[in-house]
């Protein structure tokens, strides 16, 4: 508790940190910001590439499953059941992924 006439700053001195650094020159700041932008761009490209490859794999599995189920007359019954199971797993996963991203973006 603060005594009358005292100021309580809401934190103790042990929580505070003071750093002394030389001022950043304009050239150094420009170089640092450029490096940060490049790093962010590389991270974005990696994310997009990962999503693209994942989407290609999922579309390929889905297309192959639909073809096996509906169009391949020579497919064995076990193969058709496997294709149906693949679609059963794939469909809710894709919907929940996009629904989750849409809800998370709000």
Image (cartoon, rainbow, N blue to C red):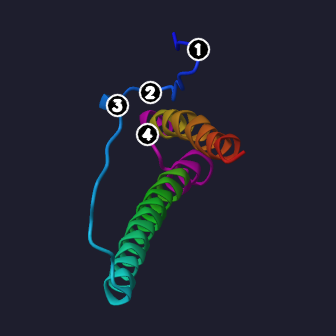
User: Mark 2: which secondary structure?
Assistant: loop
The picture quadrant where one finds residue 27 is: bottom left
Could you give the CA–CA distance between mark 2 and mark 1, rounded to whole angstroms?
18 Å
The foreground one among 2 and 24 is 2
Q: Residue at the spot x=41%, y=61% of the render?
A: 50
Front disc: 2 or 1: 1
Looking at the image, is mark 3 or mark 4 earlier in the sequence?
3
Q: Residue at the spot x=58%, y=14% of the render?
A: 4
Q: Residue furthest top?
A: 1
Could you give the CA–CA distance between mark 4 and mark 2, rounded to whole angstroms?
67 Å
Looking at the image, is mark 2 or mark 1 earlier in the sequence?
1
Say if 48 sits above or below 71 in the image. Answer: below
Q: Count residues near mark 3 (Cα–Cα under 10 Å), then give few for <14, some for 14-19, many for 20+.
A: few
Q: Residue furthest bottom?
A: 27
Mark 1 in CB contact with mark 3 (< 8 angstroms): no
Could you give the CA–CA distance between mark 3 and mark 2, rounded to whole angstroms?
7 Å
Q: Residue at the spot x=53%, y=22% of the render?
A: 6
- Residue 16: x, y in percent? 35, 38
Q: Which residue is mark 1?
A: 4
Q: Which residue is mark 2?
A: 11
Looking at the image, is mark 4 or mark 1 earlier in the sequence?
1
User: Mark 1: which secondary structure?
Assistant: loop
Q: Which residue is mark 3?
A: 13
Q: Residue at the spot x=62%, y=46% of the render?
A: 101
The foreground one among 35 and 6 is 6
The picture quadrant where one finds residue 76 is: top left
């Amino acid at each position: 508790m603060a005594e009358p006439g005292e100021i309580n700053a809401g934190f103790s001195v042990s929580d505070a940190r003071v750093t002394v650094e030389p001022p950043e020159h304009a050239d150094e700041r420009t170089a640092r910001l450029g490096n940060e932008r490049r790093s962010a761009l590389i991270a974005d490209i990696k994310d997009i590439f990962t999503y693209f490859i994942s989407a290609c794999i999922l579309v390929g599995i889905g297309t192959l499953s639909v073809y096996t189920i509906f169009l391949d007359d020579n497919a064995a019954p076990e193969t058709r059941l496997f294709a149906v199971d693949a679609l059963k797993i794939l469909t809710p996963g894709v919907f929940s992924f996009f629904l989750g991203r849409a809800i998370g973006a709000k």
